[in-house]
Image: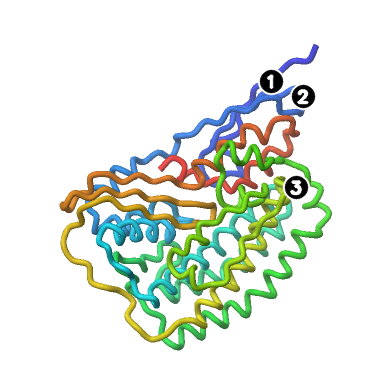
Amino acid sequence: MSRSTIIPFGPQHPAFLEPLNVSLKLDGETVTGAVLNLGYNHRGMEHALSLDYKKTQYLAERVCGICSNHHASAYCQAMESIYGVEIPERARLIRSIMMECQRLTSHLLALGHIAEAVGYENLFMQCFRERELVMRLVNEISGNRVHYSINVIGGVKRDLDASMEKRAAEAMTELRPKLDELRGIFARDSTLSKRTKGVGKLTETQARDWCTVGPVARASGIWEDVREDSFAAYGMLHLRPVVRAEGDCYARTMVRMDECLRSVDLIEECLSLLREGPVAVDVKGHPTGEGLGRVEAPRGELVYYVKAVGKLQLDRIKIRTPAFVNVPPVQVLLLGCQLADVAVITVSLDPCICCTDR
């Protein structure tokens, strides 16, 4: 008769950048049960965000450092719907450029961690080398590498002059062949294939039952991308969501890899559409009403609900982050897997605990 063993995986583990704990029940080396434990990073962000709506656009970026610009964009979008203002076309294009740049940095971070989880250290460093090119570009545009602080209610506060537009175009031209090389490695390397193909499979039915979003959902065959709802400038662009049917770690990896290449396409298209014009509209008075902001963050649909009552302090802010629904399925993905695959499966979901716990 075999004996079951219960071991903790996390909250401190080399595969995790943030505290995440899964209690694993093992029969030998096979996982027979998994219980997810969260809450280590809870900071009370929703209450803090409601204290001063003028400062919230900057504090919202601190919910998560990896998708900070998307948080600010979703909040500003919700406030703009309350004020009833339409931001200028140039501002919408600049917001889209910055969001796609952050999608690149986020996905390359996730890809690097998948490489690290399988022990492919030089591929990890290669992912971060290409990521650095985008980090330097956004630093030149916004003055910041992580929290861009470029969004304001009514538009953006930094414009792109002709030299910066040229610099951004050159960066994308330089980045594309490097991403093509990375894709070839992720797609064909035998070590990566053995560690990711058929591992941690999430069926389309399971993905829908767990309400997954973003690359996790699209890797399981669900055609869902908030960018198709035409927020920011996406209604002007040729958007082609990346969808695969396998639902395993390999599919989630390749969806993110292909989305990096699509992001380069979208940035180049935005740059070609930029025309002279204002980058913001004036917004006056304290807001009154309810607003909803939805954006496609790197991990999926990010929602901000805002209720304002004509005062500096907001009545309520509610955030629904993509990681909040993408992380819990790890409990079914781990069933039946080998202990050695736990880190790879977990990292393939691209868990963001700051977003999950808030």
Of callouts 2 and 1, which one flags the residue occurring earlier in the amino acid sequence?
1
Query: Looking at numbered disc 3 in the image, what kind of residue is underneath it?
Result: Thr
Above or below residue 207? Residue 295 is below
Of callouts 3 and 2, which one flags the residue occurring earlier in the amino acid sequence?
2
CB under 8 Å between discs 2 and 1: no
Q: CA distance from mark 2 to mark 1?
A: 8 Å
Give percent across and percent down for residue 237. 53, 72
- Residue denoted by label 2: 28
Of callouts 3 and 1, which one flags the residue occurring earlier in the amino acid sequence?
1
- Quadrant containing the C terminus is top left
Seen at 39% across and 57% down, the residue is: 74
Q: CA distance from mark 3 to mark 2?
A: 21 Å
Query: Looking at numbered disc 2 in the image, what kind of residue is underneath it?
Result: Gly
- Residue denoted by label 1: 5
Q: CA distance from mark 3 to mark 1?
A: 25 Å
266 left or right of 254 in image? left
Q: Secondary structure at mark 3?
A: helix
96 left or right of 262 in image? left
Observer able to see residue 356? yes
- Image depth: mark 3 or mark 1 in front: 3
Seen at 66% across and 61% down, the residue is: 257
Give percent across and percent down for residue 81. 31, 59
Q: What numbered label is drawn on residue 196? A: 3
- Quadrant containing the N terminus is top right
Seen at 39% across and 46% down, the residue is: 319
179 left or right of 316 in image? right
Above or below residue 335? Residue 263 is below
Q: Nearer the viewer, residue 187 or 305?
A: 305
Q: Secondary structure at mark 2?
A: loop
